[in-house]
Image: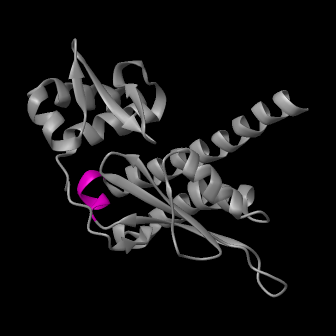
Amino acid sequence: MGYNDALALAAKKLADMPPEEVCDACGARYQNGDYYLAWFNIVKNVSAVSGVQKILMLHYLTANGAKNISGRLIAYREAAPALFYEPNFYKRAVSPLVNFFAGEPENLITTGELLGGVKAAIGDSSVTVNVLPYVPLTFVIWDGGGEFPPDGGILFDQTAKTWFKPEDLAVLAGEAVYELINTFKNKHKIKEERYG
């Protein structure tokens, strides 16, 4: 199924659902015919979002997943038992995370905190951020050392499986990593303009 087909299917499914039920189920707001949803704690008009982020938001709005965060973290392979998804997940999400934040892993925490995240106690550096209202992701860096190369991971609350299919979880993680990377870059661009 192509992007446009997936978008049309998700939009139709949402149009057939009562807005009050949608909002109650997922923490969205409905106003003047549009849904508003927090993405990294920044409220966005779903109609104005584009690309895969829009499909992810539409899938989230229609999922009716678990609202109670379990606190039990799982790796992608537990959320997506089909192992052929894992290489794509690593390439799309984990590899960019490691390539960008390894070497100075504390930058992961400070960047996550800018987006409303909270420092976690995993690896050499980790932060948990609500990507969507009931979908926290925990980003982890192991900085390695002389013997081992840097590595990383992205952990999901086990309830993430109630919100997204495995393919969507891989896309969500990738989008989230680039949100972190772009936030870090923008922060330092502003700093350079002010003090440079």
Depicted 183 relative to depicted 101: above or below: above
Q: Is residue 162 magenta?
A: yes
Depicted 32 relative to depicted 45: above or below: above
Q: Is residue 126 magenta?
A: no
Is residue 1 among the parts visible in the rendering? no
Asked if residue 195 lies left or right of residue 162, the reply is right
In the image, 67 versus 75, the foreground residue is 67
Q: Position of residue 196 (x, y in %)?
A: 91, 32
Is residue 121 among the parts visible in the rendering? yes
Quarter-of-image position of residue 101: bottom right
Depicted 21 relative to depicted 67: above or below: above
Q: Position of residue 145 (x, y in %)?
A: 80, 82
Asked if residue 144 lies left or right of residue 71, the reply is right
Quarter-of-image position of residue 26: top left
Q: Residue at x 41, y 18 (%)?
A: 48
> Total label count?
0
Q: Residue at x 14, y 39 (%)?
A: 24
- Name the residue furthest top: 32
Q: Which residues are magenta?
A: 159-164
Q: Main secondary structure of the magenta part?
A: helix
Q: Position of residue 133 (x, y in %)?
A: 32, 45
Q: Residue at x 38, y 72 (%)?
A: 73
- Name the residue furthest front: 195
Q: Residue at x 74, y 64 (%)?
A: 102
- Name the residue furthest right: 196
Q: Position of residue 83 (x, y in %)?
A: 44, 71
Depicted 34 relative to depicted 177: above or below: above
Quarter-of-image position of residue 23: top left
